[in-house]
Amino acid sequence: MADETLTLLRIRLGIEAAESWWRQLDGSSRVRWEYVTLARADKARGLFFRYRDKVFSFTDCTSFVLMRELKLREALTTDHHFVQAGFGIKP
């Protein structure tokens, strides 16, 4: 999700790089924003507490819920948690 990338950019490259990336993302016609509604958050919370043998972040779980709902099979990530949740990844 964009929030984790934004945070990573800020930590590794600084606030200016994070802001530049955000402007590009937000202005792109190729991006469709999906929001975490209360229903989606409830489903994500269920996943978060169900998989006690995993260390999924809550953000991971919201991504899993959205991806399942939108019938997406692959994520642009290097996060192995997506593989553990049954998705393919594209680094």
Image (cartoon, helix red, strand yellow):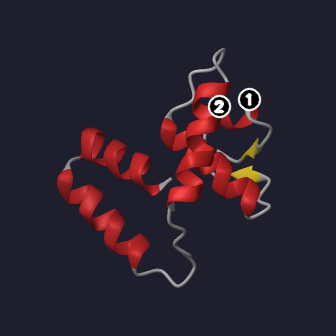
35 left or right of 53 in image? left
Task: Name the amino acid type tagged 1.
Answer: Gln
Residues marked 1 and 2 touching at CB (< 8 Å):
yes
User: Looking at the image, which residue is at 32% across and 46% down?
Assistant: 7
Q: Position of residue 17 (x, y in %)?
A: 26, 57
Q: Position of residue 25 (x, y in %)?
A: 43, 71
The secondary element bearing badge 2 is classed as helix
Q: Is residue 11 above or below residue 90?
A: above
Q: Is residue 74 above or below residue 54?
A: below
Quarter where residue 51 is shown: top right
3 left or right of 56 in image? left
> Is residue 79 something one can see in this rendering?
no
Q: Residues within 10 Å of mark 1 (few under 14, many from 20)?
A: few
User: Looking at the image, which residue is at 28% across and 56% down?
Assistant: 18
The secondary element bearing badge 1 is classed as helix
Q: Is residue 2 above or below residue 11?
A: below
User: Looking at the image, which residue is at 35% across and 52% down?
Assistant: 6
Residue corresponding to mark 1: 84
Quarter where residue 47 is shown: top right
2 left or right of 53 in image? left
Q: Residues within 10 Å of mark 2 (few under 14, many from 20)?
A: some
Determine the residue located farthest toward the top in the rendered image.
53
Residue corresponding to mark 2: 81
* Front one among 51 and 67: 51
